[in-house]
Image (cartoon, rainbow, N blue to C red):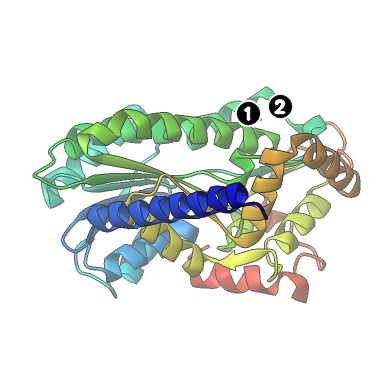
Amino acid sequence: MSKANQNALLWSLLGLGAVVAARTVVSRRRTMSFRDKTVIITGGSRGLGLVMARAFAAEGARVAICARDAAELRRAETDLRQYTPTVLAIPCDVTNPTAVREFVDEVEQVFGPVDVLVNNAGIILVSPYGNTTETDFREAMETNFWGAYYMTNAVLPSLRKNNGGEKRIVNIGSVGGKMAVPHMAPYSASKFALVGYSEGLRSELMKEGIYVTTICPGLIRTGSPRHALIEGQHDKEYAWFKIADSLPLLTVSAENCARQVLEACRTGRAERIVSLPAQLITTIHGLLPGFTADVLSFVNRLLPAPGPDGAGRLMGYESETSTSRSIAARLTDEAAVDNNE
């Protein structure tokens, strides 16, 4: 190697080292303690939302959760009181801006200004495009994007009551918001919108001490397939989705994901892609989008064909068969029991 090339390599390594060191210093300065902080988690009654609520509660936070199902919320509140007595569980439909404002007002009245907002509420539709409708896309956008928008706008005045400390917004996107997934077009479209919104928010709110973190999980074992919306050939669609959500090498546990969310939130990171497979596939997609599109086109050929017109929509738990109850889906069934699904 010539002396010029050696010098270039040396300066490159020094530059990389300086970047890593600077990032470490900044992360340490931004590190936030969750003790005695007020944390709102939407969709906190089950699945990943509930697991994150447990993790925040275990660190001494005052936790407020919301969801649409009052019975689920009661069970979740009982669960969370094992970790902290400062829990609020309030029914709220995040697609209703009036209900969202009332929920935030009640949290402030009881706990004071909000320090952390986690926009986690979402719906999942599994269906070939041939069986989807305009309503499917609108419903996905209403919950997955507009729900986060309404909640963010309702909470921002509270977050701006800074009291000398940094505040956080965490938006739970998806690897499907980085790369469209076959048979999940409405979901992917809504998560793409959320990721773009989240990134735009970060650049504008950071000057106010409000750090916005975008979380893009891959497949997480939360037990959530039971509450997915299924269209097309219901039994086949549900079976592939539930089994994929259970595979140990492609998925991570909800607890693992929650730990990564809290650490990204704690240090104010811009983005966290959860799970090694998700990191690999999004990196490849960023470099070779045509290649991944071709691969996903091949994957699509392996998935069920569209179902008959008028077959309608079922919940995941209404689409169970011997295949979806097999040992291949055992981890999802166990997570569903653990996480109020």
Q: Quadrant of residue 222?
A: bottom right
Residue 29, numbered label: none
Q: Which residue is mark 2?
A: 133
Residue at screen point 89% across, 41% down? 305
**Residue 170 to residue 322: above or below:** above
Question: Quick one: label 1, few (<14), some, or many (20+) residues within 10 Å?
Answer: some
Which of the pair 127/180 is nearer the observer?
180
Residue 189 location in percent, x, y? 62, 31
Q: Is residue 57 left or right of residue 248?
A: left
Q: Quadrant of residue 309?
A: top right
Helix, strand or loop status at disc 1: helix
Q: Are marks 1 and 2 in contact (CB under 8 Å)?
A: yes
Amino acid residing under circle 1: Phe
Calculate the distance from the C-alpha at mark 1 to the C-alpha at mark 2.
Answer: 7 Å
The quadrant in which the N terminus is found is bottom right
Residue at screen point 65% across, 33% down? 186
Residue at screen point 31% across, 42% down? 211
Helix, strand or loop status at disc 2: loop
**Residue 6 to residue 323: above or below:** above
Q: Tell me if I can see residue 257 in this picture.
A: yes
Residue 42 location in percent, x, y? 38, 47
**Residue 257 to residue 191: above or below:** below
Residue 82 location in percent, x, y? 29, 75
Question: Quick one: label 2, few (<14), some, or many (20+) residues within 10 Å?
Answer: few
Which of the pair 306/190 is nearer the observer?
190
Q: Residue furthest left?
A: 163
Which of the pair 142/179 is nearer the observer?
179
Q: Residue furthest top?
A: 134
Q: Is residue 230 left or right of residue 106?
A: right
Q: Tell me if I can see residue 71 in this picture.
A: no
Residue 137, numbered label: 1
Residue 40 location in percent, x, y? 29, 49
